[in-house]
Image (spheres, helix red, strand yellow):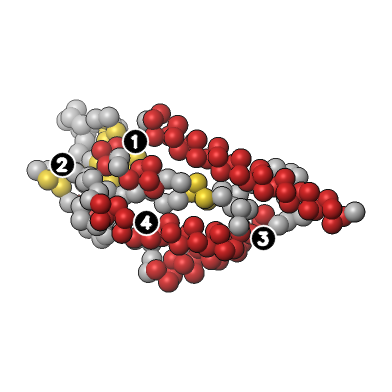
Amino acid sequence: RHAARGQYEEAMRTLFTYLRTVTRLPGAHGQGTRVLFRETTAQHFSGTGSYTPGAEKVKVNGRCVCQSHSVEVQTTNHVVNENRIVAQIARELVGGAVPVVPFYNLTASRYNMHYADDRCGGITRQGLGGNPTGRNGKVAQSTCCDCTHFCYTPQLYDAYFSGVDRALEAADGYAARQKRIEGATAE
């Protein structure tokens, strides 16, 4: 959890106020400056779906298990609420100047695509001393249950970058309108 709702909202208002300033810098649109914000990804920890202290230690039979979301978890956990806050603040403070790239719904159903026991495809990312295997030649066991970060797969990231592309197109459209306004004001 990032922070209490009020703290998160305040931090996002501060961020988007700053981003609004960046997008309004003289000539920024003509120079190709574009600002995007990506939604927070879904997490798949046991219970609420979201990380809570100690959630990274939960294992079943010695293995990390990232869990699919129930309908309730998928629509009510704090990440969903944080993304709603961001969407509202982005509309209020920056309009189309800072498009929000969707990512939560893209990752909500992908509970089985996490590193889990610090492995992706059965290979440890970080073994003892930075080696993929431990001292005895066996795959090193992680003490962490990672239900936040996703393994790379073209199916996930092609869809994600499609969202980035749409956000950039929206930002380009906004920039073109601002450039016309700046040009009309200068005349």
> Which residue has dot 4 on it?
80
Tell me which numbered mark, 4 or 1, is placed earlier along the sequence: 4
Look at label 4 and name its amino acid.
Val
Per the image, the residue denoted by label 2 is: 63
Q: Quadrant of residue 52?
A: bottom left
The kind of residue tagged 1 is Cys
Residue at the spot 49% in from the left edge and 57% down from the top edge: 87
Is the residue 138 above or below the residue 97 in the image?
above
Q: Residue at x 25, y 56 (%)?
A: 72
x then y, percent, for residue 108: 32, 45
Q: Please state if 30 lies on the left or on the right of 80 as rendered.
A: right
Q: Amino acid at mark 2?
A: Arg
Disc 2 or disc 3, which is closer to the eye? 3
Q: CA distance from mark 1 to mark 3?
A: 35 Å
Location of residue 47 by image quarter = bottom left
Q: Which residue is mark 3?
A: 21
Identify the residue position indicated by label 1 in the image: 151
Marks 2/1: CA distance? 17 Å
In the image, which is nearer the foreground, mark 2 or mark 4?
A: 4
In the image, taking residue 75 as reference, residue 21 lies left or right, namely right
Callout 2: SS: strand
Q: CA distance from mark 2 to mark 3?
A: 47 Å
Residue 30 visible in the current orientation: yes
Q: Amino acid at mark 3?
A: Thr
